[in-house]
Amino acid sequence: MNKIKTYIDNANVSRFRFWVQLVTFILFVYGGYWGISISQNLPIFACPYDHATGGTCYLISLQHQLHITWANLFSWRGVAILTSFGTFLIFFLVLNKAWCGFVCPVGTLQDWITKLRKSLGIRFSRYEDSTFKYLKVIKYIFLLWLLIVPLAIANSFFGLPQMSHDWFPPFCTICPTRVIMPLFTGDVSQLIIDFSSTPSLIMTTLGVLAAGLFLTGSFVKKRFFCLFCPMSALQYLFSKIAFLRLNKDGNKCTKCGNCYRVCDVGIKEIADDITSKNIVKDDCMLCLKCVEACPEDRCLEVTFLKFPIISATEEGFFKRYGTDNKELKDE
Amino acid sequence: MNKNKNTDRYERMKKTSSVHMAMEIKKTLKETIEDFPNNPEGMDYFYKLVSIFTEEKKINTNGKKVIATTCVQVPTELILAADAHPFRMCSGAYSTDQIGSEYLPAKTCPLVKSTLGMMHLDFYQVDKKPLAVINPTTCDQKRKLGEISRDLVDVPHYPLELPPTKDTEEARIYWQKVVKRFTKYIEQITGNKITRQKLKNSIRKVSRAQQEYRKFYTLRKGKPVIWGKDSILITNTYFYDDIERWTLSMKKLNKELERKVKNKEYITNARSPRILLTGSPSIFPNLKIPLLIESLGGVIVAEEFCSTSRMLYDTVAVDEWFMYDMVPALADRYLKPCTCPNFTPNKDRERRLLEMIKDFSIDGVIYQTFAGCQLYDMESRNISKLFEKNGTQMLLIETDYSPEDHGQISTRLEAFIESLKTRTHI
């Protein structure tokens, strides 16, 4: 048992993650070709605009379900919303934010774009701390937008006129995933700008712009889009009760900042917060690079229902960062 | 260029000081080696390394250019990457302390005086004069050292602007920029370009050294297999030794110590009071306090000094192995985890000490401050309050490099160690 634990603690998690991401990418982008449809309530951006997707993003289901009149919402139809949400929650609770770091095809795509940039030797950019604080709020605004607009299309709020159905689905139409993911199956139809009505024009234009921004943004900034992802916002509301956790023992932390340095999403608390035990923040994707970079024994630890899965160890750190120096001869 | 140097007096000073220094080193080495039985064989390398100074020999730098540093915050990886030999100049010699006293106010810390004296007399531990002295702007005295040394030392002085606080993002970014500029400076004075591959290699080299040091550090958490005075001497040799040679010697020593742990060959009574030494750094040949502690029956199992654990413990992690990420990563490593009392606030040092007390099962802390070392002295107030709350015994000792206070300190240390012994029931 101890041997297995040491093996895992010394493992190259990033390499393992790369392969998991590759497999899940194929599964959720091309899975439909083999008749795979895992669920319609997945906590990842598996986009149904890609006709071959192997599952569906929960946000699109949610938007459709919320396109409902008040009367229906509180009838038996409302139960469907709950069961759908329950399914989403069960999926989410198992892996917590690791859905983002290991499974989400949009996240994977951004990691690949980062790899491309790295291979060209081009430097990345980081947000300034103060900018970061403002930007991270945007995802919650998107979440509110996608919850309220479907209701406002189906109902009248405070006697205001109902919104046009052309705003629907309010997030998907502006989501870069809708435009980009179908391209992987050769479908370019989502690149169009729809001039049929003003809302359609606005939304499809924003969508195409977002796609362009996605590609350029993730080229210069690691996991550029994740900072704005409303799925990430929704997930974080339930992250505290998830089974998979990232814990930190602040007493063991020397604040060396290794974890913050390697963090793709730039979470400063991972290095500076020495009081919280649960260190999963809203932008965290549980990619576990911080655990790989931490040289203090059990300072950072991933647990599943309190059972330790992988811990930061000195040995593991040096395995990954120190010892493959070919210039140093042994005795 | 140096008015002070071409005089008979300077030559006489140099001659007598070099005799005094050799005597001082000989005496300390004798006490270090002979007064303690069964020193590990692996220590021979380190003893031999410092013993060459008694014969007026120097560390061989293999024809490399040499760059001197005066504090722990200089990213030595950058110097190594420019194919130069970094060496830390902080001196522990009383003989050069007396020289430095001539040029500095009376209440200056002995480390600063000694270092200035050493530079003035060209007593470098390496076989070549350094191209420059890199001086991080840490405490006030180190900061002014560079200006005072202008007329006394014919080596250019480069102030490396360390921020006075480290917790804010502004400080971090500022320091990253300082280090970036420093990279250019090193390239300029050595005439060697720091390439991506070279820097990567030098980071790995330091990392290997750290790995061995940390193994050694962890070994001391158990029952004592090595004396603290040896540990301090080992880390002192890291100041000037060739890093790869040092790492290999460390590896050998660790293997021997691991064997000793296995065979339960402890260096002294396994229940001797376990001491944590902290405060102003003990630097060879100023091993006065550590030698006293250990000859009185205590055993130093850990030191929280900028000449020991603070220098070698914390590591670098780089995400993308390009210059644009390696240089800031190095900057972070030399700023963020540093527990130097020149930072305010310095809560990290308190946390670190508490963690060490737990990890090393410490019985008592001995806090050394040098007369004139204001920062450590001031910080001792908060630390002692903290220990009071925590129930840890602490003895504060003010000392300097002169042998005069030997008797008085010996009495105080003896009483302290005896009181710890009654607690540990020997």
Image (cartoon, coloured by chain):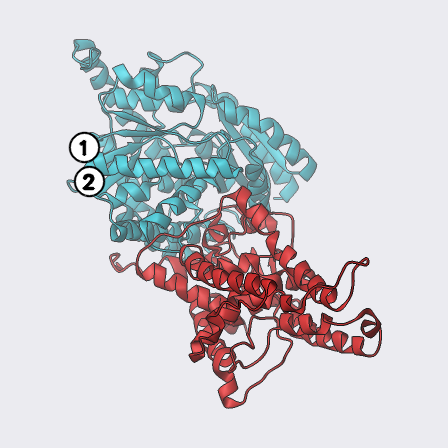
Tag 1: amino acid: Lys
Going by the numbered disc 2, the residue's amino acid type is Thr
Side of A325 relative to A266 (left or right): left
Callout 1: residue from which chain? B
Q: Is residue B296 visible?
A: no
Colour of chain A, in one word, is red
At x 46%, y 31%, the residue is B163
Disc with the residue nearer the chain's start (2 vs 1): 2
Residue B288: x and y, percent?
Answer: 43, 29
Residue highlighted by disc 2: B61
Label 1 residue SS: loop
Percent from the top left, x then y, of residue A308? 60, 67
Q: Are marks 2 and 1 in contact (CB under 8 Å)?
A: yes
Quadrant (top left/top right/bottom left/bottom right) for the C terminus of chain B? top right
Q: Nearer the viewer, residue A3 or B270?
A: A3
Location of residue B159 with respect to A68 vertically, above or below: above
Given residues B283 and B209, the one toward you in this image is B209
The answer to whether residue B180 is seen in the rendering is yes
Chain of the residue on which disc 2 is drawn: B
Q: Nearer the viewer, residue B54 or B221?
A: B221
Supply the letter of whichever chain is cyan.
Answer: B
